Image (cartoon, rainbow, N blue to C red):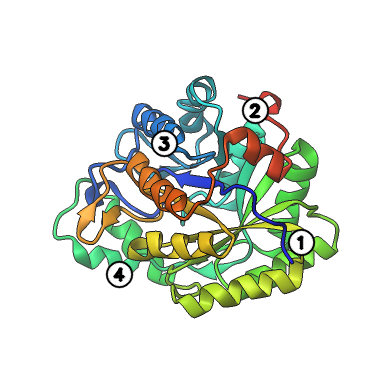
Amino acid sequence: MTQPLSKVIITCAVTGAIHTPTMSDALPFTPEDITEQSVAAAEAGAAIIHLHARDPKDGRPSPAPEHFLAYLPQLKQRTDAVLNITTGGALNMTVEERLAGPLQFQPEMCSLNMGSMNFGIFPMADRYKGWKYDWEEPYLRGTDDFIFRNTFRDIAYILQTLGEGHGTRFEFECYDVGHLYTLAHFLDRGLIKAPFFVQTIFGVLGGIGAEPQNLHFMRETANRLFGGNYHWSVLAAGRHQISFTTMAAAMGGNVRVGLEDSLYLGRGRQAPSNAAQVTKIRRILEELSLEIASPAEARAMLGLKGANATNF
């Protein structure tokens, strides 16, 4: 059995590296917009803010530490939410580029994809006739010939340098059932220690599909592999976001929303902000008689080192 869920952790992924500026005017990419939307999401109930960086000139995903540094100190001052920095970066970045910011800033938490995979966002390009910036269309279309890389050696290096070296803990992103077994492999090697946070991801082309049977299967597999040593969370891409997170919460899981994962608040209705998605899932959770974890409670549940131990 997994650990009994006392309160639900809401994570908000505010910008990501999948959606582009043409797709939504609400997608933040300047430091000011990322800061304001992150603060608002935390005030709405998100205990964890998952962060990527973008070039403020045109919104393209960026690994540059200076683009993270343009908003991280302000966020730390204005909110007590856990600031979770990506190690996934964007689809065209090397491992070294993806780690530049995390190694410099030594955050409480980072995301960590648990394997190499096809990661296809090219079908989205067909929905648009014009683009705000010239980088957007080739960035999307190029993913039909792209493999996101995280080898066993890459994962071990990240766990050792960030985890053991700087006390950072991880949001282990599992896009398919094989990623759960990879996570179990590193648990057996002693490079991961409980309590750990498993983010199961549904609906990305190249990963497991967003079907209820798969949600149950991933949960059952994680239970077999990890017993009571983990905290489970769920995100689903696009239109599946709210339905899947609601099902997961009813099954004892934590949830992730945000404009990285979906641009919508309901059928045919784009979300005006990240906070709007957090507000919606929080209302649903509370109507299910579930309590929302504060940042302090999330830190205690996940064994995080605390905001004062970061390097920003």
Image position of 167 with respect to 113: above or below: above
Q: CA distance from mark 4 to mark 2?
A: 39 Å
Mark 4 Cα shell of 10 Å, populated few (<14), some (14-19), many (≥20): few
| Vertical placement of residue 201 versus 92, above or below | below
SS at mark 2 in the image:
helix
Left/right of residue 129 with respect to residue 11 in the rendered view: left
What is the three-letter code of the residue carrying label 4? Pro
Separation of residues labelled 2 and 1 (CA atoms): 27 Å
Residue 96 makes an appearance in the image: no
Q: Residue furthest bottom?
A: 213
The reply to whether the C-beta atoms of the residues labelled 1 and 4 are less than 8 Å apart is no
Instruction: Look at discs 1 and 4 and give the one toward the viewer.
Output: 1
Q: Secondary structure at mark 1?
A: loop
Q: Amino acid at mark 2?
A: Ala
Q: Is residue 274 visible?
A: yes
Of the numbered discs 2 and 1, the one sitting upstream in the chain is 1
Which residue is the site of mark 1? 228
Residue marked by disc 3: 44
**Label 1, label 4: how many angstroms apart (C-alpha)?**
39 Å
Query: Which residue is tagged 2?
Result: 307
